[in-house]
Image (cartoon, helix red, strand yellow):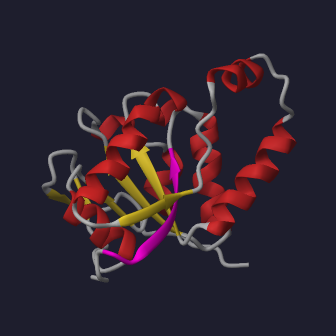
């Protein structure tokens, strides 16, 4: 694994209701000395309303997300209770795969096997529990394991399909 003080550029894909978990994740890793730079969108309440009311065109949001994913070396997908039903999370995972990014799923506390987005099962490099060492090993690419929410090992559902442009 790389040294803890090395900066990592990640895009944390998540359901907007899980914004607090994004902060929890970066705090968990910071406590272990990891410097995480997150390029994902965490919309303020006013912008959430604009998104909800369709005032931001999907093409505009897609362009912004593509740029932010492009900046990151790894896409981390927070697996929460509603993640599997969020079309934008699935789109971000598919876009990350198209860009050749490493894709790591991380179960939030309380996340379950049933909460994984379909694209994550198809394209994930690793899926790990809420443990800083497991998360960083997966982000760094030194661990490609697939875990259950409790951190126990499991087999991947699909062989990873990767597209490089």
Q: Which segment is the magenta one?
A: 5-13
Q: Camera-side residue: 38 or 158? A: 38
Answer yes or no: is residue 155 visible: no
Measuring from the top left, give residue 81's x and y in whole percent.
37, 29
Residue 36 within the segment the image draws in magenta: no
Q: Quadrant of the N terminus?
A: bottom left
Q: Residue at x 63, y 56 (%)?
A: 94
Q: Is residue 160 above or below residue 58?
A: below
Measuring from the top left, give residue 39's x and y in whole percent.
59, 55
Q: Residue at x 67, y 78 (%)?
A: 164
Measuring from the top left, give residue 158's x and y in whole percent.
41, 62
Would residue 103 appear left or right of 133 to someone viewing this image? right
* Magenta-drawn stretch, dominant element (helix, strand or loop): strand
Answer yes or no: is residue 50 visible: yes
Q: Camera-side residue: 113 or 104? A: 104
Would residue 71 appear left or right of 16 to someone viewing this image? right
């Amino acid at each position: 694994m790389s040294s803890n003080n090395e900066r990592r550029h990640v895009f944390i894909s998540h359901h907007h209701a899980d914004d607090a978990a994004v902060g929890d994740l970066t705090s968990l890793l910071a406590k272990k000395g990891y410097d995480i730079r997150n390029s994902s969108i965490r919309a303020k309440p006013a912008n959430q309303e604009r998104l909800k009311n369709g005032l931001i065109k999907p093409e505009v949001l897609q362009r912004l997300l593509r740029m932010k994913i492009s900046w990151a070396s790894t896409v981390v997908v927070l697996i929460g209770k509603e993640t599997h039903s969020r079309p934008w999370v699935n789109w971000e995972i598919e876009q990350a795969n198209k860009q050749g990014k490493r894709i790591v799923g991380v179960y939030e506390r309380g996340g379950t096997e049933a909460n994984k987005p379909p694209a994550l099962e198809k394209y994930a490099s690793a899926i790990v529990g809420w443990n800083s060492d497991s998360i960083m090993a997966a982000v760094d690419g030194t661990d490609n394991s697939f875990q259950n929410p409790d951190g126990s090992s499991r087999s991947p559902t699909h062989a990873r399909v990767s597209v490089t442009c």
